[in-house]
Image (tube, rainbow, N blue to C red):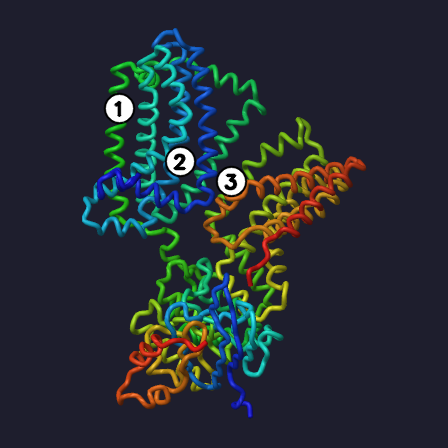
Amino acid sequence: MHALIPALQIHGLAKAFDGFLAVNGLDLVVPAGQIYALLGPNGAGKTTTLRMVTGLARPDAGDISVFGVDALADPIAAKRLIAWLPDEPLLYDKLTPIEYLAFIAGLWNVPAADAEPRAEALLKRLTLWDKRDSRCEGFSRGMKQKLALAGALIHEPRLLILDEPLTGLDAAAARSVKDILLEQVAAGGTVILTTHILEVAERIAQRIGIIRAGKLVAEGSMAELSAGRAEGTTLEQLFLELAQEDVPA
Amino acid sequence: MIALARPGSLPWLVLHDVRVKARGREGRWGRIIAMLLLALLPIAGGAVMAWRVRGGADLPLAALGSVGAVLLGMMLVMVSSAYAHVLRLGRDRGELELLLTAPLPVARVVAARVAGVQAVVALPFLLLTAPFFLFSAAFGHVTWVAGPLVVMSVALVATALALTIATLLDRLLGPKLAKLVAQVAGVGLAAAVFALGQAPNFAPKWFDAQLTYFSQRPPAPLDWPAQAVFGQPLPLITVLGLALAASQCSAWLAASRMEAAPADPTAAPHVPRRGRAVRFGGSATAVLFGKELKLLGRDPELISQIGQQLVFMVPILALIFTDGQVTPARLAAAGVFLAGALSSSLAWLVLCAEDAPDLIAAAPLRPGVAIRAKLAAALTPPLLMVSVLALVVLPKSPVAVAVMLPMALVAGLASAAMQAWTQPPARRSAFRKRYRSSLLMAVGEFVLLGSLAGATRLILTGSWWTLAVLVVPALMLAGVWWFRPKPAE
């Protein structure tokens, strides 16, 4: 029964900025226990949608439900289930990695007995353990991104939302992040990510949604999306084709 | 204007720098009009002064001492100003990288950057002094037209000195420590200059004695810079020669500084110290409070800037509240004002300059938890500072302490509220500039804290005027709250 509840259910979501409709009556369902890639051209409304899901922006209209919790009526309960990792890591330059993780654990009220070993495991896994007492100000972009990911995972979120998680990462770090996302799903978690690297979405996502002008224009598994098209159609070809179509009113 | 210069030439590069810097500023036209109006003052003053000294000797021997002392003071201020710019030279590299990869001689790019520093250092002094020299030349002292050239020469020498000091400190201490030392020295120098400016109020006899001493004509060649101002050929040629050599030295030092590419020293790897183990398991309030205090304590640049503001306030407070007599009531009033001012700075840092606002907003916190924890962090240092003052006042007047402490808390909360309700989100590095866009806010805060401090003093004298004075901050806070910008989302 529990598995039938979608990780994320969005209905009629809308958001405008100064007359520009960034999200236009979006309907979206993300099943639990999957990696869901939300794709779209720049300005399509991906980040705005995800910011509304995480409680960072208030929708003008629509409903958001996270594992059955109404995110607009009870945002605190919804936030407990979510971790948000934007493309610019949310860090404090003057804190060390271990201090940062202790801070996040405090915000999400994770008991010390759970948080401390989890922090150690995450930092070791992301090859930051040797830097645990160094301030983040000297870290490279990749190190900062990895630390932000550790911060997102320290409270074991049921829904991990990542906006362009691979930006600025070297090949090894990118591989490590992809492995962690797969592990997260294998452990029963759900991952929603946006990316412009379509190969990544094609390779690791079970379902893909393509959003344009604030509306979902296509959705499904790779097989479902390419049904009726020439054999060997890639996600890139599909994406370019859908990105040029007119958006239904 | 940039279109008039040949692309890639030195003037073109300098104009490009000016354009880039000018476009980042809000209220550019207002600023330009204000500058023009301000420029009218030295023009009028210069004309009057030049008229008064017309017909005198071309080389006023009696004035050489004073002119030399003014040049020395000017040089000190210019070195301080140049140092601040030199610290950024080569570190704000984003756009510099583009210029250095363009097919232009590196020396020209460097020269453009150095010229920018020299111009910024010289400009205020040229605006102040050039009208006098030019009017004097028009009224008959033709050789005094050399005055602005000497001022520019002093700026060139000051820039070279600043570059030399910066390079030496970098080599001796490393970029990170050198920056810290420079900031602390900058605070000390600025405070010293400010205190010196207040000397006629505090120590008039000492000030007069110093004035007499520095007005004496120094022996040659120490009086040559002053002689050069009045256009004496040999001193003027010497000063200009020194300035050209200094300029060459600046170009060389700047090139080596940029070549060394000392990226922001704060970005240098932090040397870890194994100390206390980090504690997990704190509540949201505790971790937010601890985080804010850690961030404040680990930023020496911010601490020095806050310290500088407080140093500037002490003489003003002394003049306003002590009136020549230090009483417990006046000390209590000063304590309330200082606590409010410090709270304002810290509140801006913790409330408006949050590094990761989305992280806090995405956390499952009850409404008000984050702001209360942050306020507690902002108010703790000012209240500790007032507590120290309370220990001094307590033996003389426990009543003054009993009034000062709650009033300090009220002042802290009021100034923090002003910050929270009016100031937009910003980066911590914008701390020093936060009031530049709003003179009204700066004046408002001064009135708010002044009335709370005044009320403290009136309470202790048992005056019914207290109630009237307290109406001012109450009305101000109500007005600010009513007109505060409403969040877009």
User: Residue B81 — which label?
Assistant: 2
Instruction: Output the chain of dot 1.
Output: B
The three-letter code of the residue at mark 1 reads: Leu
The one of B88 and B146 positioned closer to us in this rendering: B146
Distance between the Cα atoms at labels 3 and 2? Answer: 15 Å
Residue B152 location (% of width, % of height): 32, 27
Instruction: Output the chain of dot 3.
Output: B
Residue A18 location (% of width, % of height): 50, 61
**Residue at figure coordinates x 73%, y 42% from the top left:** B470
Instruction: Output the chain of dot 2.
Output: B
Element under disc 2: helix
What residue is shown with label 1? Answer: B240
Looking at the image, is mark 3 or mark 2 earlier in the sequence?
2
Quadrant in which the N terminus of chain A appears: bottom right
Looking at the image, is mark 2 or mark 1 earlier in the sequence?
2
Relative placement, left or right, of B71 versus B103 is right
Looking at the image, is mark 3 or mark 1 earlier in the sequence?
1
Residue B376 location (% of width, % of height): 62, 56
- The residue at the far bottom in this view is A1
User: Residue A98 — which label?
Assistant: none
Q: Are marks 3 and 2 in contact (CB under 8 Å)?
A: no
**Mark 2 surroundings: few (<14), some (14-19) or many (≥20) residues within 10 A:** many
